[in-house]
Amino acid sequence: MKTLNYIFKISLAVVFISSLLLTSGCDKKPQPRVDATFKITSNPDGASVLFNDHELGTTPYSDRIKPTTIIIKIAKSNFKPRWERIELKAGEDKTFNYDLTPITGAVLLVSRPDNAKIIINGEVKGTTPLILQNQPLGSYTAKLEKPGFAPREVSWTIKDECPQEVIVSLNSNVGRLTLTSEPSHAQVFINGAPRGYTPFKCELEEGKYQLKLEKEGFAAIEDYVNILRDQNLDKSLTMSNLPGSLEVTTEPSGADISINDEPHGVSPLKLGSLAAGKYVVKAAKNTFDAVTKEVVIVSGQKSSVEFIMTKNTGGIDLVINPPGTTIYLNGKVQGVTQKGENPMLSKVFQIRGINAGNYEVTVAHKRGVPDTKTVPVTVTKGQIARPKPISLWVANAELKLKDGKVSMGLLYSESTDKILFGPEPGVKVEYLRDEIDYLKPIITGDE
């Protein structure tokens, strides 16, 4: 470059002197330019500009010389050099721009075993074996990952265009898990993903894992395991039964429900937290037959049982004389008899809706002799018991004879000329009307 600058400076001096000589005469015209200017730029800039191996400067570079044709070299570290022919004519101003091509190399990444994922600066580039083309000069680091193997970092340096091979051996990172459960055939989840059923075996990379077992009728169970490289881990888990539930309905509702002879409430009834097993369920309701069923409760499941109950009642029809007699059934008041068409006889007294069985019917009257009488009655399901009419001796009339004798007794019958009268139980006396002073009924407030 010093030679080129020297030539350039001498040329300028000659041109300057010639100009002075030419302008010394008033009639002389100005001479045209005989030099040229040029500018050299590069992408990227900062490249050296060389002529005959002498550095003229760095881009952007500009100069002014006489017309000529020269060969220059553009060179920059890590980029391929290039030679360019520059032709300059008198009076020209030219700019030359050159794109520099970076020097790149290639590397072949190989792993043992292959199919390892290659990650560079957080970006997955592919899997081994992989050729990385057009790598600029410099140092590089990649991370290799493969399931079942420990991650590895590998580094290399691109110094020139010569391709290179990098081989990495991966170390196994796998342990083995054997999982059993009580009961067996429980579904296995590892980190939330279904993997199979117990008994279960698998290989896992070294690390901590969440285990979960699920089985119908049993409470899910969770645990954690630490898997170590090249080690076997045996794990056994015991699952707990889930309680079952039972729903009991009856037709009609309102029946008393007992389970294994223990009362639990009235239907409809829902029971939870029952252990798995067999149970005897009984439904009982007044005036209905008690019903029992055996129910199997399954862990974690809902069972149901329905009872259609059959009415087990019967009834009693009573004819009680005289009217106005109080009736008791097993000591409980049922009512008072009413007069029928015959004043001496009561209407039929009906008792309904009572369970089949044996009962005592007691009739009572305060003027009765005796004042109560009890008879046994058997009631059969679906039938009406009709015992013989029950009669109490009850004085219902006051009789005064003309001889002045007054009696309280039972008037059995009467006609225009005589009456049949009982002054005491078991005694019946016939009186003529001519013997009677008066005969009048006994009236009380409750009749």
Image (cartoon, helix red, strand yellow):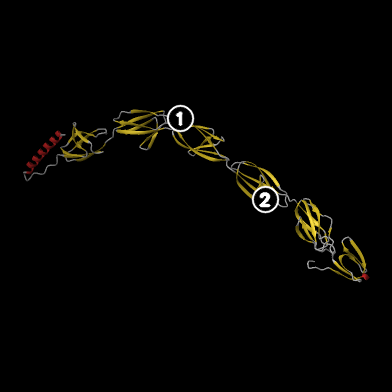
- Nearer to us of marks 1 and 2 is 2
Using the image, determine if residue 9 lies above or below residue 409. Answer: above
Give the x, y percent position of residue 257. Answer: 66, 49
Q: Residue at x 31, y 31 (%)?
A: 157
Characterize the local packing of mark 1: few (<14), some (14-19) or many (20 or more) Cα atoms within 10 angstroms. few
Give the x, y percent position of residue 164. Answer: 33, 28
- Name the residue type under label 2: Asp
* Residue 346 occupies quadrant: bottom right
Quarter placement of the N terminus: top left
Using the image, determine if residue 131 lies above or below residue 290. Answer: above
The numbered mark at residue 317 is: none
The numbered mark at residue 256 is: 2
Quarter placement of the C terminus: bottom right
Give the x, y percent position of residue 162. Answer: 31, 28
Q: Is residue 187 left or right of residue 11?
A: right
The numbered mark at residue 231 is: 1
277 or 36: nearer the eye? 277
Give the x, y percent position of residue 421. Answer: 89, 65
Q: Is residue 257 left or right of residue 24?
A: right
Asked whether the viewer can see residue 136, the reply is no
Q: Is residue 315 left or right of residue 141?
A: right
- Name the residue type under label 1: Gln
Characterize the local packing of mark 2: few (<14), some (14-19) or many (20 or more) Cα atoms within 10 angstroms. some
* Residue 404 occupies quadrant: bottom right
* Residue 106 occupies quadrant: top left
Using the image, determine if residue 322 lies above or below residue 121. Answer: below
Q: Residue at x 45, y 36 (%)?
A: 208
Element type at mark 1: loop
Asked whether the viewer can see residue 68, the reply is yes
Q: Earlier in the sequence, mark 1 or mark 2?
A: 1
Element type at mark 2: strand
